[in-house]
Image (spheres, rainbow, N blue to C red):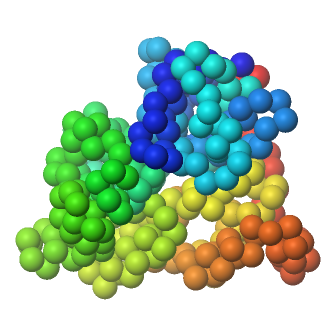
Amino acid sequence: MYEILNAQKLTDDIYSFVVKAQRVASSCLPGQFVIVRSHENAERIPLTICDYDRENSTITLVFQVVGAGSLRLSRLNTGDFLHDVVGPLGCESELCNTDISELKNKNILFVAGGVGTAPVFPQVKWLKEHGVDCDVIVGAKTKDMLIMEDQMKKYATNLYITTDDGSYGRQGLVTKVIEDLVNIEGKHYDMCIAIGPMIMMKFCCITTKALSIPTTVSLNPIMVDGTGMCGACRVTVGGEVKFACVDGPEFDGHLVDFDEAMIRQNIYKTEEGRAYLKEKEGDTHHGGCGHCGGEQ
């Protein structure tokens, strides 16, 4: 059992938990995720690790209510317990395996959409702690749906806020901000990391490809089981079949077939659709297991 030390409601449907999870906190890195269950028979929910405190053995999880499982999770309060916290899972951010001196010579841009701000944050924080500057664009539909602005301000060199309706910060989509920064404000970026809804990442990649900016995306929005067994996060990257949970979640965004992934995601939502995909994809339907670690 894993105690929730602090439960907060960030927006109408986005929540934050600080959880005591010693083993995960001691070894996790930016980009990785955990699988949680609220009780013994609950749905397994993969959640990106938003922050971690090795000294106090805690991790921070931020999630959006999108179904029955996450709704039940949102009803837990400070002092309640999670039944399971398994992880860290997935591959760490490629930044963690890049020479720091090389990173210091790069102009890095992060683009976060909605709850995608949560997995962007630990990477921005990690870079700052290693003396690397970066710019961050955070987009939301409205001001009320914006999260983690104050936390991001502490670590981003330049923070650009944009809302679809113009209720806060700039007005427009994150793609417009990318174009404005490069074409109007004269910014140059050597790499971009974009995390958010699939449709946002797709158009970010279209935009950055036109601007010749190498782009990494995180496909955690399509994960369900988190161990490669369910086949939900099967995606084509550069013509090869990959699984976000065991091969990623980070991939070269310019190689991801977003259209195929989004169509497949919609089909997977129904029981009939899952059966269809399993029959159609045969032995390639899932990615196998063997990557499960975590708290025992």
Q: Residue 76, image x and y in percent? A: 62, 28
Disc tally is 0
- Depth check: give the residue in front, 147 or 201: 147
**215 sits to left or right of 269:** left
Q: Residue 238, image x and y in percent? A: 58, 79
Q: Is residue 99 visible?
A: no
- Depth check: give the residue in front, 197 or 292: 197
Q: Is residue 72 visible?
A: yes
Q: Is residue 288 above or below residue 24?
A: below
Q: Is residue 109 above or below residue 205?
A: above
- Depth check: give the residue in front, 71 or 191: 71
The residue at the point 87 percent across, 77 percent down is 276
Quadrant of the rendering where the N terminus is positioned: top right
The residue at the point 26 percent across, 81 percent down is 211
The residue at the point 71 percent across, 55 percent down is 224
**288 sits to left or right of 26:** right
Q: Residue 103, image x and y in percent? A: 28, 51
Q: Is residue 94 above or below residue 83?
A: below
**156 sits to left or right of 41:** left
